[in-house]
Amino acid sequence: MAPRANWKGFLRLSLVTCPVALYPATSDTEKVSFNQINRKTGHRIKYLKVDAETGDEVTSEDIVKGYKVDTDTYIEVTKDELDDIALDSTHTIEIDEFVPKTDIDSRYLIRPYYLVPDGKVGHDAFAVIRETIRSMDKVAIGRVVLTNREHIIALEPLESGLMGTLLRYPYEVRSEKEYFDDIQDVKLTRDMLDLAKHIVEKKSGAFEPELFEDHYETALIDLINKKRSGAPIAAKAAPKTGGNVINLMDALKKSIASEKDMAPAAKATKEAVKGKKPKKRVEGQREMLLPIAGKGGKTAAAKEAPPKKADKPVRAPARAKKAG
């Protein structure tokens, strides 16, 4: 199933315009998620919107937005009032300026999107804008309206398309001074720095995200599969502690010694992972297959059953989320 665009409109550089579509470049829907259920019945929990004082349920038509100005004091803002001040979405990403990519503080980055030509027309104009940005080795800064709010977006070439990254406004970024002012100014010896650099050099390599593993996600899948098959769940062993570091120089030396011991095994593991055929990506949430329900709402896993090999969790088709 082809992905659905979160936003469609136009990309404009001065008088050059082309229709484009915006797609989210990342997704969290593949991660295992949980629902809250009633332990006694196995039914899902339903939440009701109630008045905080009276406890009475409130219907959707009686719910409005309110800005808190004091304890139990709110300024009511209606939907019509919000619509009146909403930015007119011209459905156009206006490119205002070009800046060096190194000038963009990483704290301002929010989330990436893919920008592609929309339809059969406008590919020439899209290519002109893309290659102009590429040839200048800069990032195009523009504005886009998503969910009634204006966002700053940074555009840069990515293969045959463009990657657009939403940026934060200055008021959204906290100053580091309030956090770093109490850090002590210590003097380090050359020997300490040399030992630390040696450790870094031993651990240096290329950025290979395909080798990353979400260990918690893997543990979640293993736990749920065991419960589905009725396999026993072993208690987790207490973690081993390395003790308090008393001498920094000794700790650096021990780190180098341990790195030498671990290096062959780590290299073999990395080469083994590289040699494996990459798994085909499946879009959608990694939801578990439904367990067989027993009496009283209890699942089959809750009954006594001989352990069996559990099926691997499958993912359902991804649901498109609104951008913004």
Image: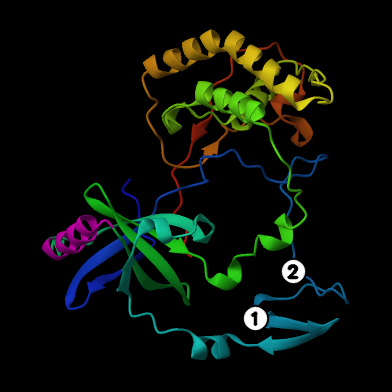
The disc at residue 61 is: 1
Q: Nearer the viewer, residue 308 or 12?
A: 12
- The verdict on residue 135 being magenta is yes
- Left or right: residue 197 versus residue 130 is right
Numbered range of the magenta stretch: 124-137
Q: Tell me the residue at 36%/65% (across/down).
A: 7
Residue under circle 2?
49
Q: CA distance from mark 1 to mark 2?
A: 12 Å
Quadrant position of residue 282: top left
Q: Nearer the viewer, residue 62 or 21?
A: 21
Q: Nearer the viewer, residue 18 or 233?
A: 18
Tell me residue 36's x, y (percent): 73, 46
Quadrant position of residue 189: top right
Marked residue nearer the N-terminal end (1 or 2): 2
Q: Which colour style is shown?
A: rainbow
Q: Is residue 23 visible?
A: no
Q: Main secondary structure of the magenta part?
A: helix
Tell me residue 261's x, y (percent): 61, 8
Q: Tell me the residue at 57%/90% (across/down).
A: 81
Q: Is residue 107 visible?
A: yes
- Left or right: residue 244 versus residue 190 is right
Note whether 245 is above or below 231 in the view shown. below
Q: Tell me the residue at 57%/85% (across/down).
A: 79
Amino acid type, mark 2: Lys
Tell me residue 316's x, y (percent): 47, 40
Question: Which quadrant holds the N terminus?
Answer: top left
- How many C-alpha atoms fall within 10 Å of the one at disc 2: few (<14), some, or many (≥20)? few
Provide the secondary structure element on which disc 2 rests.
Answer: loop
- Left or right: residue 142 versus residue 16 is right
- Left or right: residue 25 versus residue 72 is left
The disc at residue 97 is: none
- The verdict on residue 276 being magenta is no
